[in-house]
Structure formats: C-alpha cells, structure tokens
Amino acid sequence: FWATFSVLFFAFCTYGNAGYMREIMCTHMCPYARFQSAMFDKDTYTVSYDAERGEPRGPRSRKADPAEKGLGHCIDCYMCVQVCPTGIDIRNGLQYECIDCGACIDACNDVMDKMNYPKGLIRFTTERNLAAKNKKEKTNPWRMKSIGYFIMVLVVSSVMVWDVATRVPLEVDVLRDRNQLFRENIEGQIENVFTLKLVNKSQQDMTYRVEVRGFDEFELIGDSTKQVSAGEVGTLPVTVAVPPSLLEGQVTEFYFVVTAVDNADITNTHQSRFLYE
C-alpha cells in the first residue's frame, strides 16, 4: 500500500509542479530567486543580454547588413522568450525570475549561427564586463564576497561532516509517570517510575542495556535490556528504588545510561530527576 501510495503521490506532485504550475513554481515558490537577489553584485556571473551589441533590435533578411539599416544584432525573433521556463524576456535586463538555466543562450546562439553573426549576444557574464568599453574581462573572481562565501560553505560542510562522523545512532527520551510522582514500597524504599523511549537510528537490530548512575545504592526494578528493531522505537518501563537516606532533598539528579550490548561505543546518557517529599 505505502509503495503504491508513494508512487502515486509523487507522480501527482511532479505533474502538478512541472506540468500544471510550471513557471509559477519558479516565480513564487522556488527560493533560488531570493538567494540570487541577496547575493548578487556587479561581479556575479549570470545570464545577460548585451544591449550595446543587440540594440536597436529588429527583423531583417540574412543577407542584409545590420549596420546599413541602423540595427543591432538582435533580430527580435523572441526565441529567447519562447524557450525560457519562467517566461521572461532577458533582453529587459536581469529579473528575479531568472534561474540561470542558459536555455536562452543556446537559442540565441543558434539564431546567430543562422544569421552569420558572432555568438554571445546572450551569454554568461557580469554587469561590470558589459559596462567595460573595451569589452575585456574586468571582473575579479577573487573578491572578498566570493572568498567569504567559500569560507562559509567550507565551514558548514566541515560541521556537517563532523556531525555525521560523530553521530550516535541511539536516541533516548525519558518520560516520568505523571499519575504518581513517587511512592514508598514495603521495604521502605522510595520508588520513581519512568518510561524510556529508545530510538534505534542504525540499520541493524540492536539490544540495549539500561544502567543507573548517581546513587551509591539503588534497585532497578523491571527489565534492564530491550531489543529494538532497525529504525524503530522501543519502550521500556522501569522503576528506580532508592533508600530515603540517600536522597538529598525533594529533587535528586541522576543519570540513565543506555549502551548497546554488542557495541559499547554506542551509548547515550540522559539526565533525569528523582522526586521525594
């Protein structure tokens, strides 16, 4: 059931996004445009139209000389608009809907080939390069902003690698019995009841052993081991009994230590509180 549901659900979402919503996804839902506007500057390489070369635009025959007609190289064929997935006209300047896919570049270069004009009327370049009078590359790729972004990406990537490398495939959550905070048994010990939630994040079935630390003398009532399947959550109810003479007051802190029986490196310590009047 779940496999069939997943296939149908993602097929529906894919058709809705790419077949029905189309450019609405790019202009209203995709975060790329928001990042682009925040990180963009005059030295950022992006899809750009060379207005100085292309204007004034207008149709002409292939054999006509655009200079004699007072025209630029843009023949106003609208091919760049037709192939744009977001439906914008790149000749109107940079717009936040642009996703830098380069489809307009390929379409324009095909037209330039047919007209025997140089390619690159629409190309990946920067505002600074377009504004340069001699058309030589003026952009410096090793500017402080790009170096800062590189350092940020490097730091974030290092933190992610460290987090994955030191990840403990065990999560422990301790829930207290809310019905009765504490009780006294027939031996005069004070009991607190807890429920341990053991989350097995590994790909193998694991058996965990529960220990209590923080008391010189105590009794752990209930099963001290629990087998949990891969990717599942196991529930283990336990009762901790402590002589009242060892309790410091109304609240005494102690620890549950959960360790995998077959792998001592997989361990998790959870702090809890023992209550007494």
Image: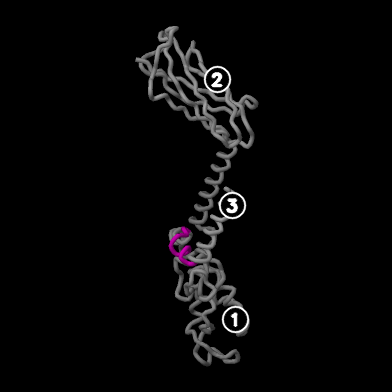
Q: Amino acid at mark 1?
A: Met
Q: Amino acid at mark 3?
A: Thr
Residue that badge 1 annotates: 112
Task: Decide: few, some or many residues near mark 2? Use Cα within 10 Å; few <14, some 14-19, many ≥20.
Answer: few
**Circle on res. 223:** 2
In which quadrant will I find the C terminus?
top left
Considering every residue shown, the one lying at the far front of the view is 1
- The residue shown at (53%, 59%) is 12
- Majority secondary structure in the magenta region: helix
**Circle on res. 4:** 3
Which residues, given as a range, are shown in magenta?
A: 22-31
Q: Amino acid at mark 2?
A: Asp
Does 245 sit above or below residue 239? above
In what element is the residue under mark 1?
helix
**Residue in the foreground of this view, choosing between 96 and 22:** 22
* Residue 269, position as x, y percentages in the image: 51, 26
Task: Decide: few, some or many residues near mark 3? Use Cα within 10 Å; few <14, some 14-19, many ≥20.
Answer: few
In what element is the residue under mark 2?
loop
Task: Decide: few, some or many residues near mark 1? Use Cα within 10 Å; few <14, some 14-19, many ≥20.
Answer: some
